[in-house]
Amino acid sequence: MSKTLIVFGTRYGATHRSSEVIAKILKKKFNHEVELVKLSSETENIDFSSYDNVIVGTSVAMFSWTKRAKKFLKNDFRGKKLFVFISSAALTYAALEKGEMEKYEKHKKRFLDNVVKKKANVEPTSTAVFGGWIRKGKTEAFSLFNWKEEDAVNWAEEIGKLTG
Ligand SMILES: Cc1cc2nc3c(=O)[nH]c(=O)nc-3n(C[C@H](O)[C@H](O)[C@H](O)COP(=O)(O)O)c2cc1C
């Protein structure tokens, strides 16, 4: 049975929701043993030595990853399969939705590919870009909502096929 750790940094909750969807699919459909960890001050030194696969997710806001997700990516992942996803609703995913592929590639490079290249010591087996949401002030209303459950489902299925 494949053991998978999902760690995520979130500000507004979308990355948490995507992580839960991925966890559910890997458990139910691919029989993985999955642990889900929300990065916080209490998760400084996660022992992930027993995991075959590590999935790192982060919120992208104000042009940056969460501090803790960025730090986690500096760990030694040799001998494991690494997967990385970003929730980049306003720029990367918005460009994808509009079919503005040049913009999409530019943002993806900046917020995903270049960060991974700079921080991670193994090449990820697969990466993904998801949407998210922005709320209007402190109200329940959204000024932007482009999170799609099916994106997380599809990527989880890809991960399932790429892992044992
Ligand atoms: C203050 C603020 C700044 C943001 N900046 C960016 C940004 O620089 N690039 C981007 O693609 N999305 C940006 N967003 C949209 C986020 O990607 C979106 O809120 C997403 O849901 C964040 O993930 P999280 O919900 O897991 O925190 C921003 C949202 C807020 C509220």
Image (cartoon, rainbow, N blue to C red):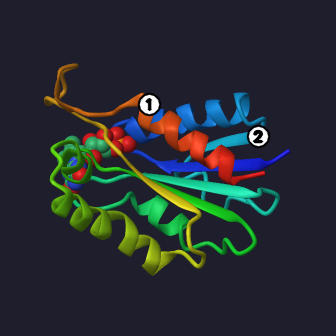
Q: Secondary structure at mark 1?
A: helix
The amino acid pointed to by label 1 is Glu
Q: Is residue 138 left or right of residue 44?
A: left
Find out if the beta carbon at label 2 lies less than 8 Å from the nearest ligand 1 atom: no
Residue 104 placement: quadrant: bottom left
- Foreground of the two, 163 or 60: 163
Which quarter shows the N terminus?
Answer: top right
User: What residue do we see at 45% from left, 71% from top?
Assistant: 116
Q: Say whether residue 25 is left or right of residue 129.
A: right
Whether residue 32 is situated above or below residue 145 in the rendered picture: below
Q: Pick the residue in front: 42 or 81.
A: 81
Where is residue 136, by image quadrant? Answer: top left
The residue drawn where x is 22% and y is 19% is 140
Determine if residue 62 is in view. Answer: no
Instruction: Please tell me which of labels 1 and 2 falls first in the chain.
Output: 2
Residue topped by disc 2: 32
Q: Residue at x 74, y 60 (%)?
A: 47
What residue is disc 1 on? 150
